[in-house]
Amino acid sequence: MTIEELKDYFDVASLPEEIQITVDMHIFDMPKFLQANIAALERWNKELEKCPSYHRLINLKKALENQ
């Protein structure tokens, strides 16, 4: 999944204010989480799949789809 595809997904997805994704990952401020992680992805110069923010966003997408 590309950065643009992720951005498009989160632009139209129904987002809760907060969500527990894993035992150690609880998002309390969804807009700030998305802004920070998308910005980190856009600055990433290596393979996208090696970016921690990419994995955070993919985990969020999976959690939203499984609600």
Image (cartoon, rainbow, N blue to C red):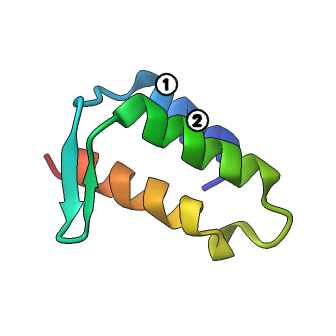
Q: Which residue is mark 2?
A: 7
Secondary structure under badge 2? helix
**Residue at image coords 82%, 71%:** 46
> Alpha-carbon distance for marks 1 and 2?
6 Å
Q: Residue at x 69, y 53 (%)?
A: 41
* Residue closer to the observer: 18 or 54: 18
The answer to whether mark 1 and mark 2 are in CB contact below 8 A is yes
**65 sits to left or right of 29:** left
Whether 9 is drawn above or below 21: the answer is above
Q: Position of residue 20 (x, y in %)?
A: 18, 54
Q: Nearer the viewer, residue 21 or 49?
A: 21
Image quarter of residue 22: bottom left
Total tally of numbered discs in the picture: 2
Q: Residue 66: x and y, percent?
A: 18, 52
Q: Quadrant of the N terminus?
A: bottom right
The residue positioned 33% from the left and 35% from the top of the image is 29
Callout 1: helix, strand or loop? helix
Q: Residue furthest bottom?
A: 50
Query: Residue 24 got which mark?
Result: none
**What amino acid type should be assigned to the residue bearing mark 1?**
Asp
Q: Amino acid at mark 2?
A: Lys
28, above or below 15, in the image? below
Is residue 8 left or right of 32 when viewed as pictured?
Answer: right
Horizontal arrangement in the rendering, residue 26 relative to residue 9 (left or right): left
Residue identified by numbered label 1: 11
Q: Judge the density around disc 1: few (<14), some (14-19), many (≥20) Cα neighbours within 10 Å.
A: few
Residue 44 at x, y percent in the picture: 78, 60
Horizontally, residue 51 falls left or right of residue 8, namely: right
**Where is residue 65 drawn, in percent x and y?**
25, 47
Quadrant of residue 18 within the rendered picture: top left
Disc 2 residue crowd, few under 14, some 14–19, many 20+, Cα 10 Å:
some
Q: Is residue 30 above or below residue 63?
A: above
